[in-house]
Image (cartoon, helix red, strand yellow):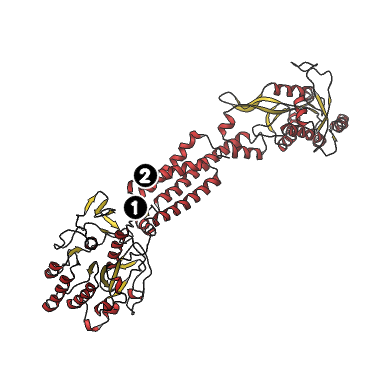
Amino acid sequence: MVRERVGDWRSAWRFALAGLLASALVVATSQTTVVAPLFFALQDQLFPVPAPSPQVTLVALDSTAAANSKFGPFPWRNDVHAQVINYLASLHPKVILFDVMLDHSTDNASDDQLTQAIANAGNVVLVCTADDRPLPQFAMHAAAVAGRELGVPDAANAVRGVPIKPAKTCPENARQEPAFVQALRIAEGINAPLTIDGNQAHLGNHDIPLVNGEMLVNFTNGTSPTCGYLLAYQGRCPDPSVITNHIVVVGIKLVDADDIYSQAVSFAHDASFCPKSRPQCMVPNQNYGYRIMGDAISTVIAGRYVRTQPDSSDLLATLLIGTLMGTAVYVLSFRRAALLTVVALAAYGLLAILLGRAGYLADPIYTPVAMALGATLSLGARYVLVDRERRKVERIFGQYVDPRIANQLAASRSIEDITSKGERRELTLLFIDIRGFTAMSEAMAAEDVLAVIQEYLNEMSSLILKWDGTIDKYVGDEIVAIWNAPTTQPNHALWAVRCAYDLIDHAGALQARLTAKGLPPISWGIGVNTGPAVVGNMGSKDRLQYTALGDTVNTAARFCSVAPAFTLLIGQATLDACTDYIAVEQVPGLQLKGKSAETFRVFQVVSIRQDTNSQWVPFPTEAANEAYTAIRRQHASR
């Protein structure tokens, strides 16, 4: 089934509108700060977290080095840093990015040693901020002085990137560039200026995508090659090859040095991150500033950039997908629509993860919420419409057909399909009428007439509904019933004949009830005919009735009018449809109005069977007549 038919495609716009309204609500919420922390917290989980570049080596001034009392209290004398730089420079790194707090006190001998070490190395990049500048002699001999500002934390209070052009920096930063860019310049011999074109920066052969003026850092899993600061001071890095021809980032790894930041990615910390006295000093998404600088360099070297969906396209996608989901639940059944919603959300989540692994950060909340909310609102609107259609159908047909048929109609067809679209289809009509009731009623009290009619109509109607017939109308003591409308019934002719059998077979029970109430017995005849007819809601604009018309209907009525008491008369079409299940006798010489007695044949059903292997059962015509005659005599004697 393509859809549970609550209407046609002209109604689809209602469900699309429900999805659009849901999406608009989500978009409006996204423009506030209420959901932003959750948005960024979820999107942070989509970062790829690759392994670090093997070309970047970290030298950490950690708690092990700080515990060495020979250096005195931190910050250490500049001659200590000089010895570290001298050792690192002897191993010929590409560049030394020195992100360590220097001693600004006046100590000419110590300062001279550091100045000489910086000058001899020739590839040292010193970091600075607008509030913390290196001494002039250090800046003069450094290969570069550059800013070490990190990006502004997002709404989830996590650093995501580094500015490509620091807003504020020290005067010594002549190029107005961040330290990781200067380190890349020296390591790769880039002299061309850093240019920014919209949301992209160009540095040599590197095209760096920007988000709000920042390069998003592709944070690594924290397993970069390392050498301890104390080991470097002592001139004994375990593996000098990780220094030679590498970019070396030297930084502070002390929890009390005020250089810890929350970043977008969590990773496992080794024992060197915290002092032994405080082994749990950091949460998994916290990192030291120099390590974030190292990850920024790794991002550019490997070309593993992280991109986000532009806000405008994100909002447009939210509106579009929410609208499509609202429409989709109209096209499908309730169960399939719910399943589609779950599958679509799962597919979107999987796609977001896969895109994240490729460096594209998808919307983790607004679009999926719009999908779910759009589907929910559309399903809610659909439920209201379906329920309204169901009530209409049940109200119209509840009095005509068995409640099961009414429910089936309500579940499968719209009120417009049923009531506004007449159709020509093959039907089986059953007419039943009391014999001689007009004359009988003239001699009866009005209340007795109504009592007889009520008992008769109740009994006959319940049997018709039992056989899934549709009660077309009551015309005095006549009942008109239809099969194969409004629902399709493949065996409609046989069902009508079996119903007629029950209508005659229950005559004795009805007579007994009438007798118990002091009412006269009655008899009835039945006519059944099968053939094409027009069926639909007919009548005036103020009053409509679901009915059928055509020659098939008229012929069934004529069969009924000439049928003897407790007899079923049928035509050739009904016989053809039931030939394996009924036995008949042709009624000779019967003339119907408008029909030729020579060419039009009428049959009386005399036997019936359950299936082709069952025994024949006589039609209860004779038994019903005998019971009627006996009860009539008893009533007459009283």
Q: Secondary structure at mark 2?
A: helix
Looking at the image, residue 3 lies above or below residue 301: above
Say whether residue 518 is left or right of residue 33.
Answer: right
Q: Earlier in the sequence, mark 2 or mark 1?
A: 1
Q: Amino acid at mark 2?
A: Leu
Q: Quadrant of residue 58?
A: bottom left
**Relative to the observer, which residue lies in front, 466 or 599?**
599
Quarter in which the N terminus is drawn: top right
Q: Secondary structure at mark 1?
A: strand
Looking at the image, residue 479 lies above or below residue 295: above
Q: Amino acid at mark 1?
A: Thr
Residue 160 placement (x, y as % from top left): 31, 59
Residue 382 placement (x, y as % from top left): 51, 41
Q: Is residue 268 visible?
A: yes
Say which mark, if any, is on residue 123.
none
State the residue position of label 1. 308
Q: Is residue 517 visible?
A: no
Question: Mark 2: few, some, or many residues within 10 Å (few <14, many ≥20)?
Answer: some
Quarter in which the C terminus is drawn: top right
The CA span between labels 2 and 1 is 15 Å
Say whether residue 322 is left or right of residue 387.
Answer: left
Q: Quadrant of residue 587?
A: top right
Say whether residue 627 is left or right of residue 86.
Answer: right
Say how many tags the image has: 2
Residue 375 placement (x, y as % from top left): 47, 46
Q: Residue at x 77, y 23 (%)?
A: 559
Question: Mark 1: few, some, or many residues within 10 Å (few <14, many ≥20)?
Answer: some
Say which mark, if any, is on residue 316.
2
Mark 2 vs 1: CB contact within 8 A: no
**Relative to the observer, which residue lies in front, 520 or 612?**
612
Q: Residue furthest bottom?
A: 70
Residue 611 placement (x, y as % from top left): 80, 38
